[in-house]
Image (cartoon, helix red, strand yellow):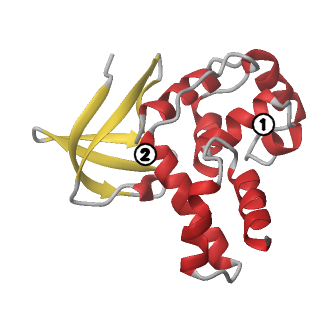
Amino acid sequence: MYNYIFGKIEEITGSYIVIDNNGIGYQVYTPNPYAFNEGENYKVYIYQLIREDENSLYGFKTQEEKDLFLKLISVKGLGCKMALPILATGSISGIVDAIERENLLYLKKFPKIGEKVAKQIILDLKGKLNMQISADFVESSTDELMEVLKGLGYKDKEVKAIIPKVDNSLTIEDQVKEALKLLLK
């Protein structure tokens, strides 16, 4: 079983990356291949799926992302190909928050996730997702918040002044609400 592969990204496609490690190119399915840059070195956290008809690698930029993926695929009826789009279109804190608050609407917005699977996710994972959020995640969450606020027409200076006052552990939606309250004061 692999834990991670460190190497240079040789190819990026819509669903996977090819990472070169000592002259071997590993095809790794990832939630967001475009989060990687071709020609740069990365440590990609790996999950290897071995079945009778399949031997696939799934890769993640952070250990937190991999941990959430492993929790998701432990849910009855939810496999790797359904868990990847959840991680691709949702933030880690948003997904965890939705599960803990039993937010079916948030979970059903993901591809191939209906009411039955969303309820199963909540049933199997609620209370079991005490995940630590890394500094990389907090930084990317802050960047996302800045982009949203700039997109709403706020100046860079205004946004930078209130960002430190916004709670990073909130979902991006709640961060935006909190930031807007601060900006309107």
**Considering only order in the chain, which callout, 1 or 2, is on the residue closer to the N terminus?**
1
Q: Nearer the viewer, residue 107 or 140?
A: 140
**Quarter the N terminus occupies:** top left
Position of residue 12 in the picture relative to residue 142 (left or right): left
Q: Which residue is mark 1?
A: 98
| Residue 43 locus on image (x, y percent) | 28, 39
Residue under pointer 2: 136
Crowding at mark 2 (Cα within 10 Å: few <14, some 14-19, many 20+): few
The image quarter in which residue 69 lies: top right
Along the line of sight, which residue is nearer the eye, 112 or 46?
Answer: 46
| 179 lies above or below 63 | below
**Residue displayed at 75% across by 16% down:** 124
- Locate the C terminus by quadrant: bottom right
Question: Dot 1, how many residues are within 10 Å of its Cα: few (below 14), some (14-19), or many (20+)?
Answer: some
Residue 40 at x, y percent in the picture: 22, 56
Looking at the rendered structure, the kind of residue marked 2 is Asp
Quarter of the figure with residue 59: top left
Q: Position of residue 68 (x, y in %)?
A: 57, 29
Q: In the rendered structure, which amino acid carries the disc numbered 1?
A: Ala
Q: Give the mark toward the camera: 2 or 1.
A: 2
Marks 2 and 1 close (CB-CB < 8 Å): no
Q: Is residue 56 above or below residue 27?
A: above
Q: Where is 158 relative to 46, above or below? A: below
Q: Name which residue lies at 78% across and 38% down.
A: 113
* Residue at screen point 52% across, 45% down: 31
- SS at badge 2: helix
> Residue 22's x, y, as percent?
10, 38
Query: Which residue occupies the extreme left position in the image?
Result: 22
Q: Residue at x 88, y 43 (%)?
A: 105
